[in-house]
Amino acid sequence: MNADPALPRLLLLEDDPVSAAFLATALEALPARVDITASLAEAEPLRDADHTLWLFDANLPDGTGGGLLARWRAQGLATPALAHTADPRQEEHDALIAAGFADVLRKPLSVAQLQEAVKRALDGVATCEALKHGVQEEDTTCTASPIWDDAAALRALNGNASIVAAMRDLFLGELPAVRVRIADAFARADADAMRAELHKLQASCGFVGATRVLAAVMALREAPMSREAFAGFEDAVEGTMRAAIA
């Protein structure tokens, strides 16, 4: 790993040794410092490290990159993230975007493709920092997870904006009752009931592009008895409902 502290520090999560070596070499040539991990367990101790960007494999031996991102987002971490996957299915890519990844890189990919995607993400980080230093009050627009992903919703519903709007109205109408059922299951420590409700809600979030709720749902599915994950879910639902009224 390049040890120059002036360079951006990246967290690479990739379980295949050959892929990890290729990706790390391409990233270090940017140049950048790269922390390489092969599992969620290895990545977890680096959660609070000062990374500029995360690059997560979608599927890992001990979980998923989307699940890890959702858990860290629910814990208040806002580092931008890219996903990489060999899965060619568009629905898988849409799900990763809905989970909060800024972009999805399909493996195998060239050095140029990887570096261009990372440079775009790093340019976004630099722009965000410049904006925050140029305002008088705290600007959370760069770090807050967006409530809706319109592009993902349009892709899921064949580009029909009127159907997206109707589905979101239905989603918001059902959300308070779903929230109550999940809260009741949490109070009873009924993990199976929680997972059943969360599974259905996750699918609904994907259809309507409910990005913030989806990230919180995935975090809670990973740890259904976690008070922190449940609080993150409550905050995401409350924020989504409040934004709909505003």
Image (cartoon, helix red, strand yellow):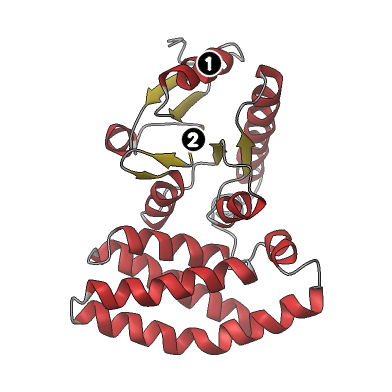
Residue 51 place in picture, x, y as percent: 45, 31
Q: State the SS at label 2.
A: strand
Q: Earlier in the sequence, mark 1 or mark 2?
A: 1
Disc 2: CA contacts within 10 A as few (<14), some (14-19) or many (>=20): many
Can you identify the residue that label 1 sits on? 22
- At 63% from the left and 42% from the top, the residue drawn is 88
Whether residue 237 is situated above or below residue 149 in the rendered picture: below
Residue 111 place in picture, x, y as percent: 65, 18
Q: Quadrant of the N terminus?
A: top left
Residue 104 place in picture, x, y as percent: 62, 41
Kindly identify the amino acid type of the residue bearing the numbered disc 1. Answer: Phe
Q: State the SS at label 1.
A: helix
Can you identify the residue that label 2 sits on? 54
Residue 47 in sight: yes
In the figure, is residue 182 to the left or right of 128? Answer: left
Which dot, 1 or 2, sits closer to the camera? 1
